Amino acid sequence: MPDALAPTFGAAHQRVHGRRAAIHRGDGVFVLPAVDVGPRHVVEAGSAEALVAALPVLCGPGEVELRLTLGSDEPVADLIPSPPPPEDTWVEPAEEALAVMDAAASVVVLAGPGVIRYGAVPGLHDLAVAAGLGVLNTWGAKGVFDWRSRHHLATVGLQADDFVLSGLGEVDLIIATGLDQAESPDRRWKLAPALHLPPEGLAPFAERCGSGRGTPRPPPLRDRLADVTQRGWTVENTPIPPSRVTLHYAQCLAEGALIAADPGVAGFWVARTLGTTRFGAVIVPSSPWPGFAAACVAVSLLRRPSQPALAVTDRSAEGPTAAIVDAAATLGLRVPVEVWDPEGDRLDAASHRERLRRLVFGTLPSGGAPSTLATDPGQMAEMIEAAGSIVAWT
């Protein structure tokens, strides 16, 4: 595998499987890339004891460079590492936080990718049900609720007016949990008093919260997005609207597929309009990383070859994506890719749906040019009118 591609594969492994991967650069230097924001660490380990002591850093956030300085002629004593300290997954709420919650007549939850990373989706569900709350999620937490749930309000953070149209400025309290600054900068979403809860504190907080708020009411954003999205669903002729394409992707999701998209036009439509029924089934990174979608599909197929998967990207990302696909082929992996290209194949809805099934479920031949698709650019103007300019990845 080319050295330049290794960090992309390593970060994709963490995003898809939830476990970090180490890249050997040679001379005893390993790099653990990270998909989350955090400080960069350099760890030098000259003994087995030092390596064990560094485990908390190796497992923490941010990229890590590990330098092993063990001498080749130095014996290494047998070492059974001590078990790591138990991770506290139950953080009791402060009484002040409960008082703030009790005093608020209207509350909404804003959830980011941390709720998935820390395995706190059940706690998020507990809180929403126990307190009768609606939940907005950023696109890194896409799928934390089935899109049909009454507690799912919208996926937010992609467009300039998302947080305003979500009603965040009209509530008494925003409960923020697991946020990523790349998806939800404070300046955009802090439109009302905020209570920050760690993902590990959601379930304990839920047990102390009463209900009485009734059924969550969808914000104006959801109706605006649905209007644009669903109009696209009815179009059968070419060029098909982007939301008709993502409707076809959703049909693949329903059959167990993974959909990964690179930031850009295609990534926007996947993050904005693809209805999800399980978390982890849709991956769109919070920061630009060319070729990331194809790498996610590759590492998914490497570990779960029977799970169908699709990488979605724009023409501008074809170079890095092609390099990832070629590298994956050396491992015996066929990475399905659909490239959104204004000059691509002009398919009607029925033809696209049929080709997509063959692409994702493995009946198209390996090798050759990637599948391209031209979509109707006019629907983007409708979406911008509905929710403002695109602010994701800017």
Image (cartoon, rainbow, N blue to C red):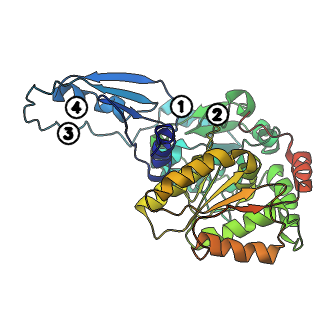
Residue 182 image label:
2
Labels 1 and 2 touching (C-beta < 8 A): yes
The residues tagged by marks 1 and 2 sit, at their Cα atoms, a distance apart of: 8 Å
The CA distance from mark 4 to mark 2 is 32 Å
Q: Sequence-wise, which precedes: disc 1 or disc 2?
A: 1
Give the mark nearest the N terminus, 3 or 1: 1
Q: Could you tell me which residue is drawn at 49 percent across and 32 percent down?
A: 95
The residue identified by callout 1 is 37
Q: CA distance from mark 3 to mark 1?
A: 27 Å
Compare marks 1 and 4 and give the one earlier in the sequence: 1
Q: CA distance from mark 1 to mark 4?
A: 24 Å
- Camera-near label (2 vs 3) is 2
Q: Which residue is mark 4?
A: 52
* Left or right of 379 on screen, residue 45: left
User: Three-letter amino acid code at disc 3?
Assistant: Pro
Identify the residue under disc 3: 83
**For discs 3 and 1, the disc positioned in front in the rendered view:** 1
Q: CA distance from mark 2 to mark 3?
A: 34 Å
Residue 108 lies in quadrant: top right
At x 51%, y 37%, the residue is: 4
Mark whose residue sits in front, 3 or 4? 4
Report the residue that reaches farthest toward the front.
368
